[in-house]
Image: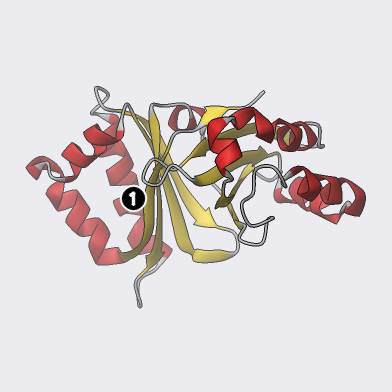
Amino acid sequence: MSNPIVEFVSWAATPAYVADPTLLQPVIDIIKNSDGNLGIFTGLVEEDNSTLYMAIVWQSFEHHQKLMDDKITYGKLFEALAPVSLHAGSDIQMHHVEFGGANVVPAFTSGTTEYTIVTLKEGKTNADLLPVINNLIEMFKEDDSATYPGVAGPVKEDPRTYVLALGWKNSQLHMAAAVNPAYQPTFAAFREVVDFKRMVHIKLVQAH
């Protein structure tokens, strides 16, 4: 039996959505009523307050694929994007992350979610990365004054790309941790194995 998988999808939001996030509800309703949906989290990137992310938990990739293959329902989903997508869905970015069955809710319902994408450096393998990324998560887990339990996993579409999702009480605490001397050896070990592609903070909330 496969583990749940998280679909991350993002696009440039309309000013109307920024002013009124309830405009996304028709999209949420279609997804939450789809077979195999286990939860939906939505929010804007702090750094620009205009990029909208959805983190959608599926029972399996096949359940999401079933929705995408349903031309009628998926067509309605794209129609529902019109009020919230600045470029009519043409700039949508999507990938699926396998977090190994870990509970994503604490990281996705914190004050802010650090969303980091990394790729393995040339010559490095998952065997090099996994101990380092586990050390990073454990290190922050001990700092419970600032963080919530984090999760990490490979991207289904590119297994050499990984996503780290870590919950923080606020992004200022993350920035302070980034320069904390006690954490630098672990950060250095991480940078030896991966190249950073993207890091943002997203104010996710659970949709209903």
State the residue in front, 133 or 57.
57
Q: Quadrant of residue 77?
A: top right
Q: Is residue 35 left or right of residue 208?
A: right
State the residue in front, 136 or 1.
136
- Counting from the top left corner in percent of width and height, residue 138 is at 30, 37
| Within-10-Å neighbours for mark 1: few <14, some 14–19, many 20+ | many
- Counting from the top left corner in percent of width and height, residue 141 is at 30, 31
What residue is shown at x 48% (from left), y 50% (from top)? 153
Residue sticking out furthest to the bottom: 122
Residue sticking out furthest to the left: 181
Q: Which residue is mark 1?
A: 133
Locate the N terminus and report the quarter of the image it occupies: top right
Q: Quadrant of residue 73?
A: top right
Which colour assignment does the render follow? secondary structure
**Is 39 drawn above or below residue 127 in the view shown?**
above
Q: Is residue 103 left or right of residue 140?
A: right
What residue type is disc 1 on? Ile
**Is 205 drawn above or below residue 15 in the view shown?**
above
- Counting from the top left corner in percent of width and height, residue 195 is at 32, 66
Can you see residue 205?
yes
What residue is shown at x 62% (from left), y 57% (from top)? 92
Q: Secondary structure at mark 1?
A: helix
State the residue in front, 124 or 30.
30
Q: Is residue 10 left or right of residue 199?
A: right
